[in-house]
Amino acid sequence: MSLPVHLVAALDGVAVGSDVEVTGDEAHHAVAVRRLRVGEEVVLTDGAGRRVVGSVASAGKRVFTVRVTSSELVERPTPAVTVIQALPKGDRGELAVEVLTEIGVDTIVPWAASRSVAVWKGERAAKSHAKWQATAREAGKQSRRSWLPTVTPLASTTEVVTRISDAALVAVLHEDATTPLASLDVPNDGEIVVIVGPEGGIAPDELAAFEAAGAVIVRLGDEVLRTSTAGIAAVSALLARTSRWG
């Protein structure tokens, strides 16, 4: 069984034999909820590639200390994978973020598509963005990732178009497309972008703007998936043809 992973702010300068103190909510959950004990082995990561393994040397109510037995710097995986996720309704946004994180997506961009039912504005935008970030953080620990994904601020269609202009491959999922996703040439470096529309579909002007920026409009198959699960299906199909899953 894999060792539990805990997120810390920084691991710069940490070497074998060092003691790393974990505090706050991260420590409280480990000690009070998961009942972490002295002598137990754990993994600590800063979410940016640094990863150490060690044994718990001490534990309190909201703090525990790990004595490091091994340390490594994990290279960022390539190709990078970005998902532009139109805002789903209800809690399906968090579901999408969770499964995309588990599968290895590097960047998740919440997108205010013209046909999105959900709307992020003002205080709601800040709270919703924070929920997506928290979901990605917890899913990243659960899936034992050394590199946690970035959840960017909400993007407009214009901002999405600008963002995708330099990508190695941009695939827009659309049920009426005639090009199958499986027919695409998948790069082993650079950035792969998958654009997932909202429940109401991607508007014609949005499709046109994405195509003008170099995107390919594709379909997964005969079935129509929910916006919260289409991204994981598409990314899985693409990653299976890269060195990341090779």
Image (spheres, rainbow, N blue to C red):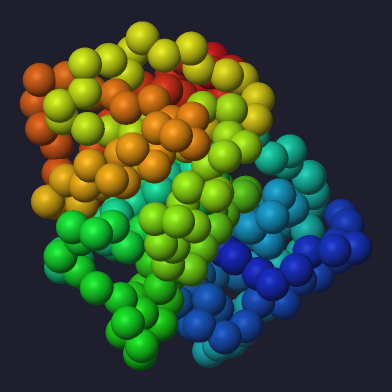
State whether residue 238 is above or below residue 172.
above
* Direction from residue 220 to residue 129 in the image, left or right: right
In the picture, residue 37 is in which quadrant?
bottom right
Residue drawn 69% across and 55% down? Answer: 48
Q: Position of residue 128 (x, y in %)?
A: 34, 76
Examine the rendering and report whether any part of residue 169 can be seen.
yes
Residue drawn 17% across and 19% down? Answer: 221
From the viewer's side, name the closer residue of 42 and 81: 81
How many marks the image carries: the answer is 0
The furthest residue to the left? 223
Residue drawn 50% across and 17% down? Answer: 186
Q: Position of residue 14 (x, y in %)?
A: 86, 62
Q: Position of residue 110 (x, y in %)?
A: 38, 60
Examine the rendering and report whether any part of residue 127 can be seen.
no
* Direction from residue 41 to residue 173 in the image, left or right: left
State whether residue 157 is above or below residue 176.
below
Tell me the quadrant of the picture where the C terminus can be found: top right
Residue drawn 28% across and 45% down? Answer: 205
State whether residue 146 is above or below residue 31.
above
In the picture, residue 136 is in which quadrant?
bottom left
Q: Position of residue 44 (x, y in %)?
A: 65, 60
